Image (cartoon, helix red, strand yellow):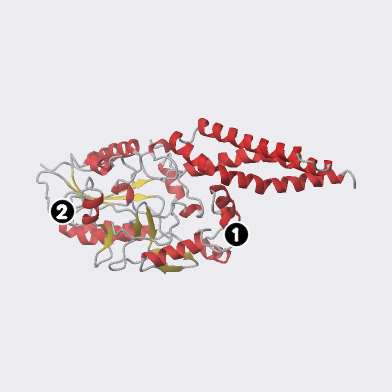
Amino acid sequence: MLQGKPIAGKIVSFLLSIPLCYALLVLCKPLLMILQHDWGFGLATIAVIVIVLLLLSAIVGFAIYRTHTTSSIKQMALNIYWPTILLTPTMAFAEAYLHSTGHNEGFETMYSYMRYTEHFEENHQYFADSIGITKANAKYYKTHHPEVYINNEGFRSREFTDTCAGQQRLLMLGDSFLWGLAAEPQSACFADLLDAEYCIYNTGIIGAAPNQYEAIATTYIPQLKPHITCLFLFAGNDILFFDAPLRPFVPNNFWTEGMGLSSVINEGCGEIRYFDTADTAYSYFLNRFSLHTRKSWFLKALSFTHVGTYLYFLIKSPNTPPSCDEYNKNLKPITLHYLQRIKALAEQHHSKFLLFVIPEKNAIPTTLDELYDRYPCEFDGFKPYLPLNLTTSDYALGGDMHFNNEGHAKYASFVKEVLEAETQYIK
């Protein structure tokens, strides 16, 4: 019994040290963010934070040790002091790392790009037409981003009335990669790099998916009569498991500066939820995927840091409920159906259809067989083109999953090689 008391005391002291460490982390977080912003996530930042936290821990421990208390209380103070010295720098390192990956505290990892605000102020940089095709608002970009040209059809492209005599006309279908997100400047996008040699109609829009690709193809292939229709499929959220028809005048996302909210979400078990306004979408995401609106003081305390948020959602995931596991086992992706219809439409109008694949940053195939193994039924009847020389260094830093300038240049070179091998120039 006596031998067990010191061990029990150490366990109790260790447990008491955890909230102390977390409190120190919360106090030092402003300094951590300032240093990380100025110096980046590196040894210098971590070293300074570790030193500061060690000093704080030492001061707290010394103050407790010097008080006039019984030896048992002093021993407990020491037992709290040593874990604090070790745990607080560890927490600081984890906090700095999670911050460097682009996460925002208080939100579940999948939605950690979101920011907390009392009211979601939509900026209307995108809109949907009468068909439901999401397009860019030319007035918004002319005012806020004059360097980005939006044509009369609502796309970051040359005017669709430009027939480019003597050049091959290419209709490009895609999402934020084709839009040029993370390219600096945006004209460093792979589509722009190819525009000097081809007449490119670029319909890439942030948040677009195969349902939009089909709607664009249906609308513009007959109008533009492209020699080639290129679809750039992102092997991430373009692999669809549920069908969500486009809705007239409702864009695929509601936007404020630097943050977009989907207007449709799969809740699991085949339940699809639609949002008609930005406020209803934001309220839903806050209540389900955030700690900021929770009433518990404990959860609000966790929302102050990346570490607290990450640990909470690691233990209690807000995603698909366990009751949907059996349903999800039988789910099959439906992207193939969209690809088949787009290809048939292109061929009907004598446009050569080419399918390019953009791999995920954290799952880059090194062979085509690896791509087929990962997506066994998504490319049946197709010859997908995939560059095999991409690495994670070709993508933006942190949590951004898009190409950087090097990635865009590499992908443009690959697309050019394919076009030269598959097609002939117009004489």
Front-most of residues 334 and 266: 266
- Residue marked by disc 2: 160
Task: Classify the position of the C terminus by image quarter.
Answer: top left
Q: Is residue 243 shown left or right of residue 330?
A: left
In whole angstroms, how far apart are the C-alphas of marks 1 and 2? 56 Å
Q: Is residue 19 shown left or right of residue 288?
A: right
Please identify, in this view, whether the residue under mark 1 or under mark 2 is nearer the observer.
1
Find the residue positioned furthest to the right.
1
Please state the horizontal and vertical placement of residue 44, each as a whole percent of the image. Answer: 51, 30
Report crowding for label 2: few under 14, some 14 to 19, many 20 or more residues within 10 A (C-alpha).
some
Query: Disc 2 marks which amino acid?
Result: Phe
Find the residue positioned furthest to the front.
68
Query: Disc 1 marks which amino acid?
Result: Trp
Front-most of residues 294 and 357: 294
Residue 120 location, quadrant = bottom left
Q: SS for tag 2?
A: loop
Image height of 331 relative to 363, above or below: below
Disc number placed over residue 367 in the picture, else none = none
Front-most of residues 78 and 41: 78
- Residue marked by disc 1: 297
Q: Is residue 331 visible?
A: no
Q: SS for tag 1?
A: helix
